[in-house]
Each structure stands twice: as structure tokens, then as C-alpha cells.
């Protein structure tokens, strides 16, 4: 059963275009952080996929990272061969993706952006990601997610202590 009605219109259109049949779940409380989303869904934080926008020499790049890990900006810089990589501000995130921080999905963006997917998201059978708003999420198998997002599999997480 597909319930795109609760999804952000831009995201719902992307699902349609990709022929992706996923259930979008809406929660009364915000799921802006990986912890909030995991608590609402009842899953592990690592099963949440964060869609994070960075600027590599001023050019936006999307990094897909599991919710329990942090992006190693230096590894992203090396992966892209960039001089400088910084976290995108709210304005650049919205201009690039069409969504506000806290609701950015891994697919269905306003612009074509390079996507790096950390290999760690493949450690799970199912992952959850934002569906375009801070109140909505959807589940998908991680290999499909990476394929539909056009992501390159990389190792860009901060080493765990």
C-alpha cells in the first residue's frame, strides 16, 4: 500500500517518477534528529539514514550516513578531491534540495547533486529516512536507496573511538 499523501509533494513526485512503492509514515512529533526518528519508529539509531548537505569548494554534495555515526569531513574532502568541505547552511540546503534541514530525504531533490553513501548503511536490512518533512519517514532496503539516490559507496564516517 502506498501512502504518498502524507509526503512532501516534491518527494511524492520523485517516488512516482522512480516507481518506488514505499509507505510514508507521519508522526505527530518532529523526527528532525536521528534519535527522535528512531524513538518514533521503534528502531535502532543506526537504522536511520541522515541526508546531509555539505559544500565541497562551494558545490553542494549530499552525504548519506547512518544515524549513529558522524561524517568525517576530511574523508569527504579526500573522496571528492576538494580543497575545502564545509557543512551547508540552511539556505544552501533548501536551495539545493528543496527541503528544510530535518526533513531532507535522500532522493527527490530540486537539483541534481553528487551523492556519497557511507557503506555503513548497508549493514541493515531496512533503513529509514526523512520523507521531505520533519514529521515524515519512509522505510527502504539500503541497496535500493543507494541505487535510487545515485550514490557512490564510500567510507566517510568518523572512526569510532
Image (cartoon, rainbow, N blue to C red):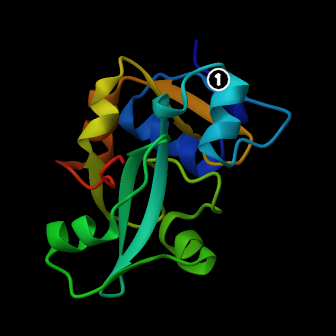
The mark total stands at 1
Of all residues, the one furthest to the right in this rendering is 28
Q: Position of residue 146 (x, y in %)?
A: 29, 39
Q: Is residue 109 above or below residue 25?
A: below
Quadrant of the snapshot with the N terminus: top right
Please indicate, yes or no, whether residue 64 appears anywhere in the rendered image: yes
Residue at horizontal 50 percent and vertical 41 percent from the top: 67
Where is residue 12, by image quadrant? Answer: top right
Residue at horizontal 63 percent and vertical 30 percent from the top: 38
Horizontally, residue 118 falls left or right of residue 15, namely left
Q: Position of residue 98 (x, y in %)?
A: 57, 64
Q: Is residue 101 above or below residue 144?
A: below
Where does label 1 land, which residue? 3
Of all residues, the one furthest to the front in this rendering is 161
Where is residue 73, by image quadrant? Answer: bottom left
Q: Secondary structure at mark 1?
A: loop
Residue at horizontal 33 percent and vertical 29 percent from the top: 142
Circle 1 Cα neighbour tier, 10 Å, few/some/many (<14 / 14–19 / ≥20): few
Where is residue 72, by image quadrant? Answer: bottom left
Of all residues, the one furthest to the top in this rendering is 1
Q: Position of residue 47 (x, y in %)?
A: 47, 29
Amino acid at each position: 500500500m502506498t501512502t504518498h499523501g502524507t509526503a512532501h509533494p516534491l518527494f511524492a513526485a520523485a517516488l512516482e517518477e522512480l516507481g518506488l512503492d514505499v509507505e510514508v509514515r507521519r508522526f505527530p512529533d518532529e523526527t528532525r534528529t536521528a534519535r527522535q526518528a528512531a524513538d518514533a519508529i521503534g528502531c535502532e539509531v543506526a537504522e536511520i539514514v541522515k541526508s546531509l548537505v555539505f559544500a565541497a569548494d562551494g558545490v553542494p554534495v549530499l552525504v548519506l550516513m547512518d544515524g549513529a555515526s558522524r561524517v568525517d569531513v576530511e574523508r569527504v574532502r579526500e573522496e571528492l578531491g576538494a580543497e575545502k568541505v564545509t557543512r551547508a547552511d540552511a539556505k544552501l540546503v533548501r536551495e539545493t534540495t528543496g527541503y528544510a534541514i530535518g526533513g531532507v530525504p535522500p532522493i527527490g531533490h530540486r537539483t541534481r547533486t553528487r551523492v556519497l553513501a557511507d557503506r555503513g548503511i548497508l549493514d541493515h536490512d531496512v533503513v529509514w529516512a526523512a520523507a521531505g518533512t520533519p514529521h515524515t519517514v519512509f522505510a527502504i532496503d539500503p541497496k535500493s536507496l543507494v541505487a535510487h539516490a545515485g550514490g557512490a559507496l564510500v567510507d566517510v564516517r568518523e572512526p569510532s573511538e
